[in-house]
Image (tube, rainbow, N blue to C red):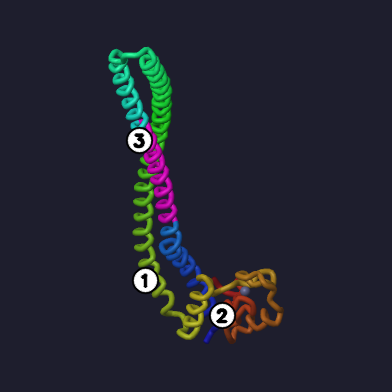
Amino acid sequence: MNFKEELAKLVVLQEEDTLLYNSIQTIEKTIPEEIAELKDELKVSRSELTNAEEKLKGLQLAKKDKELTLAAKEEAIHKAQTQLYQLKTNKEYQAKLSEIESLKADISSCEELVLKALEGIEAAQEDVNKASDAFKEVEQKFTDEISVLENKAKELNAEIEHKKEKRAGVTKDVDKKILEIYEKLLNKRGGVALAPISNGTCGACYMHVMPQIINSIKMYDELVFCPSCMRILYIHEDLSL
Ligand SMILES: [Zn+2]
């Protein structure tokens, strides 16, 4: 077997496989991660809107409560005023008057509270509007970007199929045993089974490679592996690529 030729074939195969590996990584990792990120963003925006809506609802309920108190006080004052003319003694009359005064003070502070509540509601409503606009924007972005990613995934899948077919055309000429070793490494070493020697180091893990290892590569009578990352080593200049 001509190891130099086999290595040259592997280098070509590795170039194809790197592209294939990147496409598969994009489909299996990058795109799902981007989708998860978009989903998170949508969820955060949704919960900001829900929080704003709940705050508004709480303030509206509190205002309703204050209005009920106010109505009760107003009814009480009306009742007290009616009673005022039925009272017989001056003492009772004075007591009723002071009750009315105290109710008036209560009503005045109740009215103030209702006004304050109204201001709070206005601000909270504004927050709801803002959160709702922001949510709509994020939702639109989500829909748009998901559709872009889905199209990208579709294109990549077609591309991967095409690359696999092309790959089969390349692998059929590679020695079966060498191909098996190469493919095992490809799976174990993150899609990179080959490493060129560059300035006396392994081009994949950058560890220094001893001169005797380089010499054994140059013999071309076996595959030589990087002692630290175990990839198949080659000398680019030696191969007619
Ligand atoms: Zn290495």
Kindly identify which residue carries mark 3: 61
Q: Which residues are magenta?
A: 34-63
Q: Quadrant holding ligand 1?
A: bottom right
- How much space separates mark 2 and mark 1, taking CA atoms? 25 Å
Name the residue located 36 percent from the left edge and 47 percent from the top edge.
Answer: 144
Front: mark 3 or 1:
3
Name the residue located 41 percent from the left edge and 42 percent from the top edge.
Answer: 51
- How much space separates mark 3 and mark 1, taking CA atoms? 67 Å
What amino acid type is highlighted by mark number 1?
Answer: Glu
**Mark 2 or 3, nearer chain start:** 2
The relative height of residue 216 versus residue 61 in the rendered view (above or below) is below
Front: mark 2 or 1:
1
The relative height of residue 153 versus residue 67 in the rendered view (above or below) is below
Q: Secondary structure at mark 2?
A: helix
90 vs 237, nearest the viewer: 90
Name the residue located 32 percent from the left edge and 23 percent from the top edge.
Answer: 76
Q: Secondary structure at mark 3?
A: helix
Name the residue located 52 percent from the left edge and 80 percent from the top edge.
Answer: 6
Q: Is residue 124 left or right of residue 194?
A: left
Ligand 1 within 8 Å of the CB at mark 1: no
**Picture coordinates of residue 228, whole percent (x, y):** 64, 77
Kindly identify which residue carries mark 1: 165
